[in-house]
Amino acid sequence: MITLTDSAASKVKDLLADEGDESLALRVAVRPGGCSGYSYEMFFDGDRAEDDLSAEYGEGVKVVVDPSSAQLLAGATLDYKDGLQQAGFSIDNPNAQSTCGCGESFS
């Protein structure tokens, strides 16, 4: 299961508040594709499958991961930065043997 830093949890909480739907959770998934083999996908989702893994971070930030993605995200950390050099979400994944230059895909 992926872990959220305090910064990422705070930003997700703000974005969820903007959505105005308390049933939504952040879904983090790994899909085949991208220039390195797999790509990350993140979106707000109100649907849950019985075998989804879930965790809660901060005050009410729910994260959902499907079982096959959870295997590839074990030990990974989602962070959020807002600075001049770097802005946005990033995933530090110890399971990634290599990443592409843009950081959006891995193998």
Image (tube, rainbow, N blue to C red):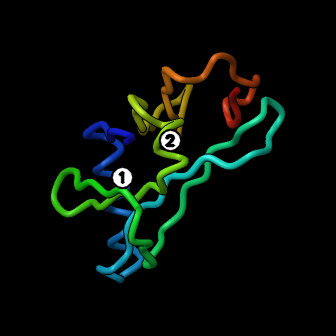
Residue at 45% x, 38% y is 82
Q: Residue furthest right?
A: 35
**Image quadrant containing the N terminus:** top left
Residue at 38% x, 28% y is 75
Provide the residue designation for mark 2: 89
50 versus 55 height, above or below: below
Q: Position of residue 29 (x, y in %)?
A: 55, 52
Query: Where is residue 49, by image quadrant?
Result: bottom left
Name the residue type under label 1. Answer: Lys
30 versus 102 height, above or below: below
Provide the residue designation for mark 1: 11
The 10 Å Cα crowd at callout 2, few under 14, some 14 to 19, many 20 or more, is some
46 versus 37 height, above or below: below
Residue at 79% x, 44% y is 33
Residue at 50% x, 26% y is 93
Element marked by disc 1: helix
Q: Position of residue 32 (x, y in %)?
A: 75, 46
Name the residue type under label 2. Answer: Phe
Q: Position of residue 48 (x, y in %)?
A: 42, 74
Query: Where is residue 76, by image quadrant?
Result: top left
Q: Position of residue 60 (x, y in %)?
A: 20, 63
